[in-house]
């Protein structure tokens, strides 16, 4: 039963990684850039939600929506100001700019919200009144006579991840904008010739990725409630690893990579060693890339001579 | 033939200019130190600047000359720092002369970093592009995790190692040298600005000779077109490995220099952010341009210190400066303007 417990928390952590990895993978697929600032957008989203809920006592759902809105706007603004002028520049220049944006967001957060850790409120609780009239706060369900405990955060995370995946798959395969995105990721020049507005499509990709990052930030901080300006960086790196793991540029790959990474991390923590869990996660990544150099679901592009 | 000769002379002239500027900077700074007209904060930064210069030049060998993005360069620095400083501590009684002990420490640090570079290079160099980059990142994090959990002590029976928890069981004469997350404590500060200068010069000699040699041309051929290079008989794996291991060894020596400048050193100092910091020096200085790396490393190490009057805002200003510089250097209008200002400027080769 403990195994099942670990598996479920692994899937939950993996779902968060998957949602973040989506942002990386979509932006990489379309703009061919590693957006290192993505992890910090998560942190911004979490802070917005935190202040909306605990300072201005808005309902949690409104807080999440507000965070999504702010992050979406942030994503578009950053793309316009920092990445758009570098469309034709070498990829390393864009990478360094992304790192600059990441520093900027972290330090702006440090100035705005200070480095004191904030305790993120858990919005995923059920309040009820028992027979004696006392208020009972439940934060999860218990199965098999209390042997298997699943918190509502875990359930919500997995559920939200599934919904996002389904919505995104529908969006990219059925809608006009989604098709434009796939066309741009395949061949920008040809897409432009077909009358697709490439710049608008790239902006849209950043908007979606950043909006998802806000959701991921709220879920991450609900499960691990300490919030500091560097909260986003390690999950960001892990999610980036997850995206590569599954094959960067591929949406199902991000899901698979995220889930596997989350499960491996929790299992490594539980059964091998807490301190070495990161090393084990990265070691598995290296082995996978050696066997499948383009990730699990990535397309192997043959070089033409 | 004449074209080739003038090209050669140009690169030689460039190398000599780099040497001359480094020596000049050393003499000027040394003179300022002896006359005491240098602020103590800048004086304290001279050794780290030298270490970062070596890091930047060595990473430029991987990123600029070999053309492979590495996001784990700090890992090699970490290997060099821990092995080099541990060696220096062990040899404290054997070699009383500090500069010699530092030199031996650096050599050991470089050797271990080269070994790590070789072992990591075997899997890494089979991959391409961003996948290679992510694997170097992964190795950097693994090295950090290992040093965070490694315990090493010495007693009358010799060296003892343990992983995860301190089970070295030293006798009463023993001392713990590497203490897991506590790192190495009680380091004698044996690094000096002169030692840093010597290391920078050695690095430049090694890198310039490698780049100018037959091997260097093979490495650049691989960077420009791997398939074409392979088809004319260049041994791709061998030359890639040569560049990668050289780069790792130099980073290891820089790590020893850096660590021996502080009294304690922990593994978390050499994390992903440090790798990125060095990468910023390389890209800002120009890929394949060693002088650029040196200037960028020195300037960007001093910049946060120089921005001290902005206090809380200095890292914010640093980030903005970084973004603006990248936007300005890649602005097509500005680029063509600069190209027109410098007559007879040859067409810039694309580095990546």
Image (cartoon, coloured by chain):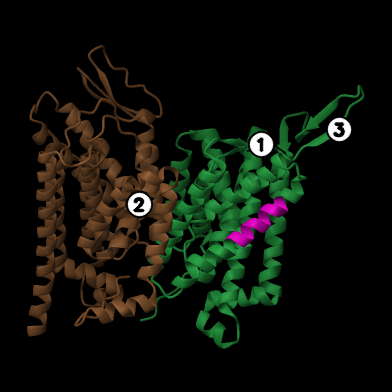
Q: Is residue B78 left or right of residue B88?
A: right
**Which quadrant is home to the C terminus of chain A?**
bottom left
Chain identity of mark 3: A
For residue B277, which numbered disc appears in the image? Answer: 2
Q: Is residue A206 left or right of residue B230?
A: right
- Disc 2 crowd rating (10 Å Cα; few below 14, some 14-19, many 20+) is many
Above or below: residue A238 compared with residue B170: below
- Which chain does the brown colour mark? B
Above or below: residue A271 compared with residue B160: below
| Figure colour of chain A | green
In-front residue for pair B262/B344: B344
Same chain? Circles 1 and 2: no
**Which quadrant is home to the N terminus of chain A?**
top right
Q: Residue at x 54, y 35 (%)?
A: A116
In this view, the residue farthest toward the top is B172
Estimate the x, y position of residue B265 in percent, counting from the top left: 30, 33
Q: Is residue B7 left or right of residue B39?
A: left
The segment highlighted magenta reads A64-74
Disc 2 is placed on an element classified as helix
Q: Quick one: label 3 or label 1, which is nearer the N terminus?
A: 1
Above or below: residue B320 compared with residue A7: below
Q: Quadrant of residue B43?
A: top left
Above or below: residue B69 compared with residue A259: below
Q: Residue at x 75, y 35 (%)?
A: A139
What kind of secondary structure does the magenta stretch mostly adopt? helix
- Disc 3 crowd rating (10 Å Cα; few below 14, some 14-19, many 20+) is few
Distance, label 3 to label 1, CA atoms, is: 25 Å
Disc 3 is placed on an element classified as strand
């Amino acid at each position: 039963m403990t195994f099942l417990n670990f598996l479920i928390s692994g899937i939950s952590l993996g779902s968060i990684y998957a949602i973040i990895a989506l942002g990386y993978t979509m932006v990489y697929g379309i703009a061919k850039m590693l957006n290192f600032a993505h992890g910090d957008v998560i942190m911004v989203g979490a802070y917005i939600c935190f202040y909306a809920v605990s300072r201005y006592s808005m309902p949690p759902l409104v807080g999440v929506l507000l965070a999504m809105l702010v992050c979406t706007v942030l994503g578009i603004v950053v793309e316009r100001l920092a990445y758009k002028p570098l469309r034709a520049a070498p990829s390393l220049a864009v990478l360094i700019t992304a790192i600059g944006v990441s520093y900027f967001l972290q330090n702006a957060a440090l100035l705005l919200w200070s480095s004191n850790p904030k305790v993120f409120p858990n919005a995923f609780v059920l309040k009820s009144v028992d027979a004696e009239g006392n208020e009972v706060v439940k934060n999860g369900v218990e199965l098999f006579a209390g042997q298997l405990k699943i918190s509502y955060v875990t359930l919500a995370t997995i559920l939200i991840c599934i919904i996002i995946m389904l919505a995104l798959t529908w969006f990219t395969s059925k809608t006009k904008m989604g098709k434009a995105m796939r066309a741009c990721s395949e061949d920008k020049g040809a897409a432009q010739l077909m009358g697709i507005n490439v710049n608008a499509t790239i902006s849209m990709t950043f908007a979606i990725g950043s909006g998802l990052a806000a959701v991921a930030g709220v879920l991450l901080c609900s499960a691990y409630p300490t919030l500091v300006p560097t909260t986003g960086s390690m999950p960001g790196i892990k999610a980036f690893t997850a995206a590569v793991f599954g094959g960067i540029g591929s949406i199902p790959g991000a899901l698979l990579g995220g889930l596997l990474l989350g499960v491996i991390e929790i299992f490594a923590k539980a059964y091998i060693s807490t301190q070495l869990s990161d090393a084990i996660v990265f070691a598995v990544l290296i082995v996978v890339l050696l066997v499948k150099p383009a990730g699990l679901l990535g397309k192997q592009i043959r070089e033409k001579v | 033939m004449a074209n080739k000769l003038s090209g050669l002379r140009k690169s030689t002239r460039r190398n000599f200019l780099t040497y001359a500027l480094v020596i000049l900077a050393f003499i000027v700074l040394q003179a300022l130190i002896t006359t005491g007209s240098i602020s103590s904060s800048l004086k304290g930064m001279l050794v780290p600047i030298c270490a970062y210069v070596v890091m930047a030049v060595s990473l430029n060998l991987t990123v600029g000359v070999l053309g492979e993005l590495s996001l784990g360069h700090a890992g090699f620095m970490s290997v060099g720092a821990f092995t080099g400083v541990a060696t220096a501590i062990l040899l404290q009684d054997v070699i009383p002369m500090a500069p010699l002990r530092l030199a031996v420490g650096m050599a050991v640090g470089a050797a271990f970093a080269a070994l790590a570079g070789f072992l990591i290079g075997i899997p890494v160099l089979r991959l391409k592009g961003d996948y290679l980059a992510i694997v170097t990142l992964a190795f950097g994090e693994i090295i950090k995790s290992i040093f965070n959990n490694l315990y090493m002590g010495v007693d009358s029976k010799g060296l003892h190692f343990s992983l995860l928890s301190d089970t070295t069981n030293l006798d009463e004469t023993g001392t713990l040298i590497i203490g897991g997350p506590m790192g190495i404590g009680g380091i004698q500060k044996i690094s000096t600005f002169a030692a840093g200068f010597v290391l920078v010069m050695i690095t430049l000699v090694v890198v310039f000779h490698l780049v100018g040699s037959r091997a260097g041309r093979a490495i650049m051929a691989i960077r420009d077109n791997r398939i074409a290079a392979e088809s004319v008989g260049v041994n791709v794996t061998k030359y890639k490995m040569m560049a990668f291991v050289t780069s790792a060894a130099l980073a290891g020596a820089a790590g020893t220099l850096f660590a021996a400048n502080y009294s304690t050193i922990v593994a978390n100092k050499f994390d992903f952010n440090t790798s990125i910091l060095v990468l910023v020096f390389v890209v800002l200085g120009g890929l394949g341009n060693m002088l650029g790396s040196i200037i960028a490393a020195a300037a960007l190490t001093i910049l946060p210190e120089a921005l001290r009057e902005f206090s809380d805002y200095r890292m914010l200003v640093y980030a903005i400066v970084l973004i603006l510089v990248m936007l300005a250097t890649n602005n097509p209008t500005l680029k063509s303007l600069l190209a027109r200002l410098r007559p007879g400027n040859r067409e810039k080769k694309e580095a990546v």
